[in-house]
Image (spheres, helix red, strand yellow):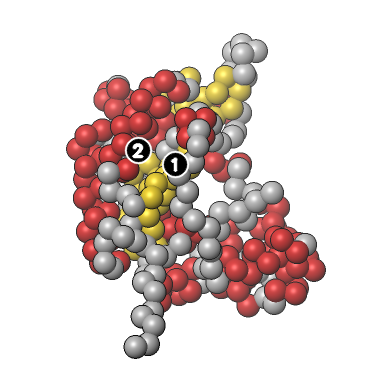
Amino acid sequence: MPDEKPHPKILLHIDMDYFFAQCEERERPEIKSKPVVICVYSGRGGDSGAVSTSNYEARKLGVKAGIPIYRAKKLAPDAVFLPVNMELYHSISDEVMEILKNYCEKFEQESVDEAFCELTGKVSDFDEARSLAVRIKDEIKQKTGLTCSVGVAPNKLVAKVTSDFQKPDGLTVVKPEEVLQFLAPLKITDLVGVGKKTGERLNELGVKTIGDLSKLSKDNLIREFGQAKGAWLKQASQGIDDSQVEEREGTDQIGRIITLKENTKELQ
């Protein structure tokens, strides 16, 4: 008998929407329709420090993670400014992660508001995975009051890009045969690991989209970015990623990280 073709992996990536600010909105329903900005104060007094995250109303006014608090106050003078409350976020994060673990064959918490879930042995195909993702989103909404965005794909790299594709409250499923078509029109900085510096250098090479990047030869990329990063860029542009979903030791420590997301995308 011929060998059966192995089933593709089915992975889910969950990303809680504007998590810190959404937690604050849950605790204070009266601020829900207002711009909300979560700040990491430096301890030097006044408005010294940086924005950790903000809700979508604040983002529309130009308030982004990493900008100084005083600048955020100029952009959004009527916003609600709150200090980071990690105790609250971790208690809600723990609720979310416990719900998610019940659905996973393997589970990997990536940060306080993100996790990977391997569904390969739990569902038979990507259509079934979509239905399961809807159930997960519904249960999280029902039990915690929060929305999340979910991506389902054949590997971690694509699942992470996919969860960011339709935010907030999104669900995007990319089957193996759809990966190249899905990635091609996206900005190169949509690949996690391609930050501002790499993006700018690729722009100088005439590369604007992931599709453009996939057309560059591996040799060219290695010459430009070095062996490891050049080879990775070539693979990533084709949606190839062999990394496993791994249960991490000390997930508590991972969860304690305050991520300034827009500033931490660069692959070292």
Q: Which amino acid does label 1 sit on?
A: Gln
> Residue visible at 60% across and 74% down?
214
Q: Which amino acid does label 2 sit on?
A: Met
Q: Is residue 53 among what the camera can see?
A: no
Instruction: Tell me: 178 left or right of 261.
Output: left
Vertical order, 237 against 90 (above or below): below
Q: Quadrant of residue 2?
A: bottom left
- Residue 240 at x, y percent in the picture: 53, 68
Q: Do the residues labelled 1 and 2 touch (CB within 8 Å)?
A: yes
Q: In which quarter of the image is the N terminus?
A: bottom left
Secondary structure under tag 1 reads: strand
95 or 69, nearer to the observer: 95
> Residue visible at 26% across and 66% down?
124
Q: Is residue 246 among what the camera can see?
A: yes
Residue with the mark numbered 2:
97
Return the mark for residue 123. Answer: none
Q: Which of marks 1 and 2 is nearer the N terminus?
A: 2
Vertical order, 176 against 197 (above or below): below
- Residue 163 at x, y percent in the picture: 40, 54
- Residues packed near mark 1 inside 10 Å, few (<14), some (14 to 19) or many (20 plus): many
- Residue 147 at x, y percent in the picture: 30, 41
205 or 158, nearer to the observer: 158
Residue positioned most to the right: 223
- Residue 232 at x, y percent in the picture: 64, 63
> Residue visible at 38% across and 41% down?
16
Residue with the mark numbered 1:
109
